[in-house]
Amino acid sequence: MQFWCSATGRPWTWEWQAYPGAWLFVAALLVGYVIVRRRSPGAAEWWRIPLFLLGVVAVWAAIDWPIGALGSGYLLSVHEVQYVLLGLVAPALLWLGVPVQVTLSLPAERGVGRVLHSLARPLPAIAVYHLALLVTHIPFISDALMPTQIGSLAIDLTWLLAGLWFWWPVVAPEGINLVRAPLRIGYLFGSTILPTIPAAFITFARYPLYSLYELAPPIGNIAAKGDQQLAGLIMKLGADPVIWIAMSIVFFRWAREEG
């Protein structure tokens, strides 16, 4: 039994496989959230609970069977689905699920409160997020890490943690976030432009870039080059709508407040 999804080189089968590491990680998220809710001063908004649970479901879907297994060693396109879920969808939902009272109650001068205030600066956040995106998509790094459980776990956690940092300057409550709505919109818009370079490189490459996925046991009639082209499209067209939705929400909330 494997602890975490990783490339194995074995022929793919649709027979269910257990990955206890994924279950423990999801359980840790849920337990941590229960603790945070209990320590929340005052009445925390009930509607944040389903948002957090949706974020947990997105994490679970990305790291467990079958998406986790397929993305770790068979299909680059599914690997990019993992990136969208772990780097964009799940972090946004997880942050939105945290009660505002908790973050605002933390002192800004020390501990976690000081860290949250530091992470709300947009330039380091966008730089680290896109650096993580680029580094984890360098072929020789991906080919070296994905066959090991520790390496695959490292990439998954890198995407999730970088995504949490990326979204914090957008969703952080007033009192922590000093970035005005127009700048948040520009921050998000810039994040739709930067990934175009690696996405285009992957999509229009003349040959497969990742030996891991090129030499993986085939699944049906899916060719490595076609799978890679689809992966590049998912990196761009799968991620952009998430950011556009966030831009729309920020814009309409800003318009309502200024109204």
Image: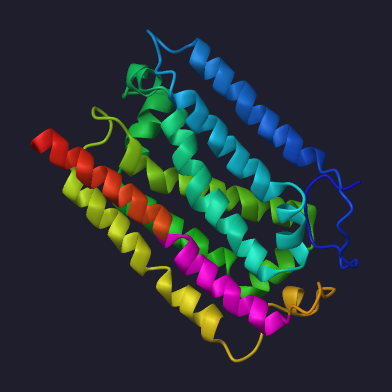
Q: What secondary structure do most residues of the magenta stretch adopt?
A: helix
Where is the C terminus found, in terms of image quarters? top left
- Residue 96, relative to residue 181: is it above or below? above
State the image coordinates of residue 208 (x, y, percent, origin top left): 66, 84
Colour scheme of the rendered structure: rainbow
Q: Residue furthest front?
A: 221
- Residue 142, relative to residue 2: is it above or below? below
x 24%, y 52%: residue: 185
State the image coordinates of residue 258 (x, y, percent, origin top left): 9, 37
Q: Residue furthest left?
A: 259
Q: Is residue 218 left or right of residue 178?
A: right
x 70%, y 50%: residue: 153
x 44%, y 25%: residue: 48
Q: Is residue 129 visible?
A: yes
Nearer to us in this view, 212 or 50: 50
- 209 falls in the magenta region: no
State the image coordinates of residue 140 (x, y, percent, origin top left): 66, 74
- 227 falls in the magenta region: yes
x 49%, y 74%: residue: 199
Residue stretch in magenta: 223-240
Q: Residue furthest bottom?
A: 206
Q: Is residue 117 left or right of residue 22?
A: left
State the image coordinates of residue 211 (x, y, percent, origin top left): 73, 79
- Residue 224, relative to residue 149: is it above or below? below
Q: Is residue 229 left or right of residue 68?
A: left
Nearer to us in this view, 25 or 121: 25
